[in-house]
Image (tube, rainbow, N blue to C red):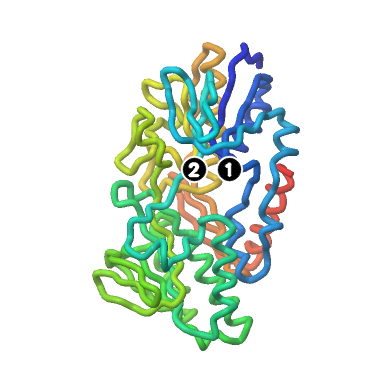
Amino acid sequence: MESNGEQIVILGAGFAALTAIKSLRKNRFNGAITVISPHSVFAYLPSTIWIPSGLRSREDLEVPLENFFTRFNVRHFQGSVTGLNSEEKRVQTDNGEVPFDRLLIASGARFIQKLPGIKEHAIIPCDGIKAGEQIRDRLAAMDGGAIAMGFAGNPNEPAAMRGGPVFEFLYGIDTLLRKQGRRDKFKLTFFSPAPEPGKRMGPNAVKGLLKEMAKRNIDTHLGHKMKGITENSVITEGGEFASELTLFMPGLTGPAWLTESGLPLSAGGFVVADKGGRIENHPNIYVAGDSGSFPGPAWLPKQAHMADLQAEAAIKNMLSDMAGRPEQHQFKVELICIVDSISTGVLVYRDMKRAIAFKCRLFHWAKLLFERLYLRSIR
């Protein structure tokens, strides 16, 4: 479509942002696109689960975006967003201001790190490739001991959590230690303040997950509010247990700059939007991915696949708005993931009608294949 000289600015360089760029060009938008992000590098975070085992390295998962930006005729503006002036249509960054006609917020979420000891004594598994490397190095240096892995949500927005990768690290580390012949030297504990962790994957998911933990001789500590993490333990209202290596995924909230943006925010700190990524009273601004709070079921996931679907819907609505013929595109609500354990995988699928979980060795290879195809599309 003709651009009418409109400048589209996209915040972020993750799944939602890259899908938005591809969707714009696929729908024949030929105008200017500017991406604002601290670095022009894409990190394929779903595969950090394989870094501790050596199956993947930083070089495998980081993709410089120069070629991608050139192919899609995108300008990259290096900077971190610090604020937004929606009335003057300007994004504020630590490297100056960037004007826009249409804005897509696809800058992801941040982890809530208020729990005492979390910054000093825990590794957040999804906190970039560096986290996977830290886990790899810490495991290699340990002769034995206690390892604890868990996750929590945002008390003001319970759906704002990312628990799936913790299960993958849990099963993956168990499998790795068994392959190394030293599993008997370690005590593994899974913990969560939720009494039924993994329930968002489906009504039968919790039973399956706990059954698998029991099979692997992994202890559980569930349903107790977190109090803190120390160098050698995890403390909850239900007691304290040993941990010399703690992997903890806290709840999510929106980027810090949103608090002063003037945009409508949910109780959990995310931009409130409809099912098409539109924001009430801000007709030129849209949101996709983890930065948004969208209507939907309680199990609506914050994951890469959902971010892609939300970005496609938001871009279609943006283009229809630009054409002066607003349409009501809505993203499909579904959860798709493969919970991998190095040697096998469990396919989890959920939509508004069904919830399915199926274990098969082939799913491990399917996850590897999807990674390969996705990275090839942006290289």
Outermost residue on the front side: it is: 95
Outermost residue on the left side: it is: 237
Which of the marked residues, 1 or 2, is nearer the chain's N terminus? 1
The amino acid on which the numbered mark 2 sits, given as a three-letter code, is: Gly
Residue located 60% across and 36% down the image = 78
Figure quadrant of the C terminus: top right
Q: In the displayed structure, would residue 316 be above or below residue 147? A: above
Residue located 48% across and 29% down the image = 92
Q: In the displayed structure, would residue 160 be above or below residue 278? A: below
Figure quadrant of the N terminus: top right
Q: Position of residue 109 (x, y in %)?
A: 45, 45
> Contact (CB < 8 A) between labels 1 and 2?
yes
Left or right position of 48 against 201: right
Q: Taking the image as drawn, is residue 353 in sight?
A: no
Q: Position of residue 341 (x, y in %)?
A: 58, 69
Identify which residue, 320 or 234, lies in the foreground. Answer: 234
Q: In the displayed structure, would residue 279 be above or below residue 18? A: above
Count of marks overlaid on the render: 2
Q: Secondary structure at mark 1?
A: loop
* Quarter of image, res 199: bottom left
Left or right position of 63 against 223: right
The residue singled out by tag 1 in the image is 14
Q: In the displayed structure, would residue 7 be above or below residue 248? A: above
The amino acid on which the numbered mark 1 sits, given as a three-letter code, is: Gly
Residue located 55% across and 33% down the image = 95
* Quarter of image, res 320: top right
Q: Residues within 10 Å of mark 2 (few under 14, many from 20)?
A: many
Q: Secondary structure at mark 2?
A: loop
Q: Position of residue 363 (x, y in %)?
A: 63, 62
The residue singled out by tag 2 in the image is 108
Q: Position of residue 20 (x, y in %)?
A: 59, 33
